[in-house]
Image (cartoon, rainbow, N blue to C red):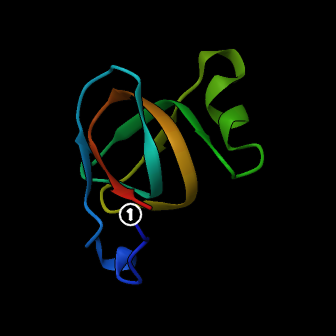
C-alpha cells in the first residue's frame, strides 16, 4: 500500500493505545490524548529518545495534545493514552 500524502492529517489511520501492553506498528506520529501520558518504552529513529525512557526505569510524561514525530515501531505506556498515526 502506498503512503498517502495526507498522512499528516491522519487519513492513513492509526491506533488508539490506552493500556500498558507493548504495541508494535509503523507510525509517524504519537499524540497524547491524556493530561499525563507516561511512556516507559519507545523505539524509533529519534536519537536518544529511548534513553529518556529506559534509563533507571524512568518515564517520559506528555501532556494532552503533545506530539512526537519520527518513524516509530514500538511503544509501551505506564499510564494515559495516545493515538499512534500510521506512516
Q: Tell which of 67 and 27 is nearer to you.
A: 27
Q: Position of residue 7 (x, y in %)?
A: 37, 74
At 69% from the left and 51% from the top, the residue drawn is 45
Q: Which residue in the protein does label 1 denote?
A: 1
Q: Position of residue 11 (x, y in %)?
A: 25, 73
Residue 70 horizontal side relative to residue 7, left or right? right
Q: Tell which of 30 and 36 is nearer to you.
A: 30
Q: Quadrant of the C terminus?
A: bottom left
- Looking at the image, the residue that sits furthest to the bottom is 5
Residue 72 horizontal side relative to residue 14, left or right? right
At 43% from the left and 71% from the top, the residue drawn is 3
The crowd level at tag 1 (other Cα within 10 Å; few <14, some 14-19, many 20+) is few
User: Above or below — where is 1 with respect to 39?
Assistant: below
- Looking at the image, the residue that sits furthest to the front is 1
Q: Position of residue 41 (x, y in %)?
A: 54, 29
Q: Quadrant of the N terminus?
A: bottom left
- Looking at the image, the residue that sits furthest to the top is 56
Residue 55 horizontal side relative to residue 25, left or right? right
User: Above or below — where is 23 with respect to 83?
Assistant: above
Amino acid at each position: 500500500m502506498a503512503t498517502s500524502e495526507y498522512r499528516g492529517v491522519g487519513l492513513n489511520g492509526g491506533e488508539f493505545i490506552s493500556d500498558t501492553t507493548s504495541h508494535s506498528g509503523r507510525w509517524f506520529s504519537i499524540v497524547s490524548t491524556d493530561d499525563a501520558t507516561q511512556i516507559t518504552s519507545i523505539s524509533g529513529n529519534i536519537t536518544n529518545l529511548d534513553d529518556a525512557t529506559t534509563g533507571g526505569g524512568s518515564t517520559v510524561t506528555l501532556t494532552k495534545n503533545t506530539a512526537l514525530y519520527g518513524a516509530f515501531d514500538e511503544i509501551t505506556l505506564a499510564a494515559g493514552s495516545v493515538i499512534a498515526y500510521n506512516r
